[in-house]
Structure formats: C-alpha cells, structure tokens
C-alpha cells in the first residue's frame, strides 16, 4: 500500500511527490534531518528531536519552517494518515530550490523544502538483534568535522555499513585519533569497571537524543556514568558495549572486530538500560 508523504505543506501518495532537480538537498546535501520513533502510535522524545532540528538549522543559517508546535502537528498527521503504530517518522529540511546550481547560498526568500515520510517497523521495540546483539567492526572516521549537525551527508556512514556487511558484521564503530567517536548511525557506549562510559558531546559526534535520555535514566537509577572518550582497545576489553539511536534504542554490541565483548552476549547493564529506556519512553511518548 502506498504511503502518504508530506512535501511542503501537501500530503500526497508517495508516487505523486516531487522535489526539483535543483533542490540544494539533492545537489549539495545542503539539508538536515531527524528520525523520531513511534511506539503505540505515539512519538518518542519528540521535544528532543524538535530542539536538535532547530539547532542543526541554526548552525547552517537555514530558516526553520515551523515552530515546535507546527512540527508536532505535522508528525501526528503523518502518524494518523499512515495508520502508524510502531515505526519511524523521517523529516528532512533542505535549503530549497534556487532554480539553478550555485555553490553560494540562495537569497533568504528561497523557501526551504520540507519532506516527511513514515516507515512501519512492527518489530521496532523487539527486534531479533536486541536479543542476539550486534557485531561491529572498527573503521577510521573519515566524515566531515561538524558531526554535531544532523546533515544528510551520510555517504561515509553508508560505506561503513557496507564495510561491516562485507565483514559479516552489523555495524561499524568509527575511530579517530585512537578514540571511538560513534557508530555509523548511533552513539557508542561501553561498560567498564562498573561504569557506563560514552564520549562527551562536541563537534566529533551527533548529540543523540537517545544518548541524552539514557544518560539521564542511568543517573536517575544511581548508576555510575562517565562522559569521556574511550579507546578502541578499551572497548575491546570492556565488560559490555552497546549503541543507542532512535531506531535501535539501546542495542547490545557483543563483538568488536571478531573479538567477543565480555561474554559475547548482551550484558546485564545493557539489558537493564534497554528495558528502562523502553518503559520510560512509552510512558512519556506523546
Ligand atoms: N541516526 N550518531 C549518528 C551518526 C546518527 O546518525 C544517529 C541517529 C545517532 C543517534 O541519535 P539519536 O539517538 O538522536 O537517534 C548518533 C538516525 C537514527 C538515522 O540516521 O537513521
């Protein structure tokens, strides 16, 4: 069945949706995006995604086409029109269509392009991978330097996924100056010496909305948490490892470069954090 997608104020069957070949999202990856999960027909941590979207747009001097309340209405409309129970709402804002190709930004009157679509994922909360865990490989982080802005420049992340697949793994952890930055599309965590460790925010990683929620929940549960960079060697020797994102929630990582992390099965703290996250997010979803 065809989905109903959103393009610049209109709700259309996906086959009828059009974006110009001159759109800067298409020609320059001059665009930002958000992915918000939906559980039981309700949006998970919507406010966090709306705030990060506003920040990404501001960092690129791009106009935010809607206030937070307008975005919420659009998200709910997308969920309702597509009868979405469990899955994702994707949104993208580009710098629009200036009518020609030009490296310089167009004048402010060129309106941003807004595209939204949904992805139904019935097993979102309970995917088989949550029980078995992900195997990851380590690869050099060759992305640009402003990874805190959620742009659609995702080619190296795609390449990383393909390198992982070629190695029989599920994802790649990116390494820069000996330190793990993050996964191809998720934040990276380890548990070592009874402490939960994840890299601090900055320009080197995306400020994950799931990351922020897991940090808060771990602290509220009186778990020891440390925000500091960690090396690949430390990750390999850790007791547990996991990744967080809006689509994977808290995903156990059971091997790095073919070497088991801990016992090679999802660790107890990881499992507890996944349960805690899902329980709290279901309660707070809007
Ligand atoms: N990816 N780091 C990167 C590079 C990401 O692309 C993502 C999200 C995250 C986690 O952020 P959050 O917890 O806000 O989802 C970290 C999304 C899910 C995607 O591209 O599909």
Image: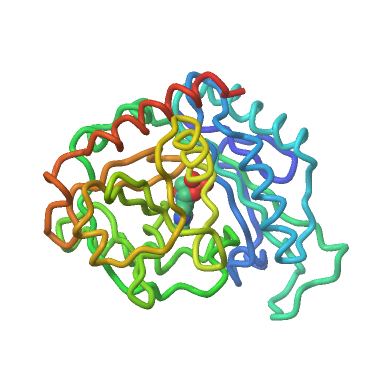
Please name the colour scheme applied to the rendered image: rainbow
Q: Is residue 232 left or right of residue 44?
A: left
As rendered, which of 280 and 67 lies closer to the eye? 280
Depth check: give the residue in front, 209 or 110: 209
Q: Give how far across and how far down residue 239 sits, in percent.
A: 21, 48
User: On the image, which quarter does residue 32 sit in?
Assistant: bottom right
Tag count in the figure? 0
Residue 78 occupies which quadrant of the picture? top right
Quarter of the image where the C terminus is located: top right
Q: Position of residue 248 (x, y in %)?
A: 38, 40
> Looking at the image, is 9 positioned above or below residue 229?
above
Question: Which residue corresponds to the image point at 56% horizontal and 67% vertical from the top-left?
Answer: 203
Going by the image, does 239 lie left or right of 206? Answer: left
On screen, residue 78 above or below 229? above
The residue that appears at 35% across and 48% down in the rendered structure is 243
Examine the rendered structure and indicate whether residue 250 appears above or below residue 134: above
- Point out residue 89 in the picture as x, y percentages from the top left corner: 54, 37
- Return the residue nearer the eye: 113 or 14: 113
User: In percent of the image, x 66 and y 36: which residue is there?
Assistant: 47
Residue 74's quadrant in the figure? top right
User: Farthest right residue?
Assistant: 109
Q: Position of residue 280 (x, y in %)?
A: 49, 24
Q: Is residue 181 above or below residue 34?
A: below
Given residues 97 and 134, the one toward you in this image is: 134
Taking the image as shown, residue 72 lies to the left or right of residue 188, namely right
Residue at 71% across, 66% down: 60
- Quarter holding the N terminus? top left
């Amino acid at each position: 069945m065809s989905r109903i997608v959103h393009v610049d104020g209109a709700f259309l069957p996906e086959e009828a949706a059009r974006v110009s070949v001159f759109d800067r999202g298409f020609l320059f990856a001059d665009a930002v995006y958000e992915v918000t999960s939906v559980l039981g027909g309700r949006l998970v941590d919507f406010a966090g995604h709306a705030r990060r979207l506003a920040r990404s747009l501001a960092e690129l001097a791009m106009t935010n086409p809607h206030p937070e309340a307008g975005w919420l209405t659009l998200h709910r409309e997308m969920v309702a029109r597509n009868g979405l129970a469990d899955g994702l709402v994707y949104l993208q804002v580009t710098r629009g269509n200036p009518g020609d190709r030009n490296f310089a930004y167009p004048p402010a009157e060129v309106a941003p392009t807004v595209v939204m679509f949904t992805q139904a994922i019935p097993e979102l909360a309970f995917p088989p991978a949550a029980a078995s865990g992900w195997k990851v490989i380590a690869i050099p982080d060759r992305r640009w330097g402003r990874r805190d802005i959620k742009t659609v420049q995702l080619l190296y992340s795609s390449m990383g996924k393909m390198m992982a697949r070629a190695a029989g793994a599920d994802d790649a952890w990116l390494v820069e100056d000996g330190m793990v930055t993050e996964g191809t599309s998720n934040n990276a965590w380890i548990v070592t010496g009874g402490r939960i460790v994840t890299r601090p925010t900055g320009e080197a990683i995306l400020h994950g909305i799931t990351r922020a929620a897991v940090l808060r929940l771990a602290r509220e549960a009186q778990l020891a948490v440390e925000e500091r960079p960690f090396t690949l060697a430390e990750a390999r020797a850790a007791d547990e490892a996991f990744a967080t994102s809006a689509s994977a929630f808290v995903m156990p990582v059971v091997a790095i470069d073919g070497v088991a992390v801990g016992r090679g099965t999802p660790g107890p703290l990881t499992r507890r954090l996944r349960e805690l996250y899902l329980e709290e997010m279901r309660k707070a979803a809007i």
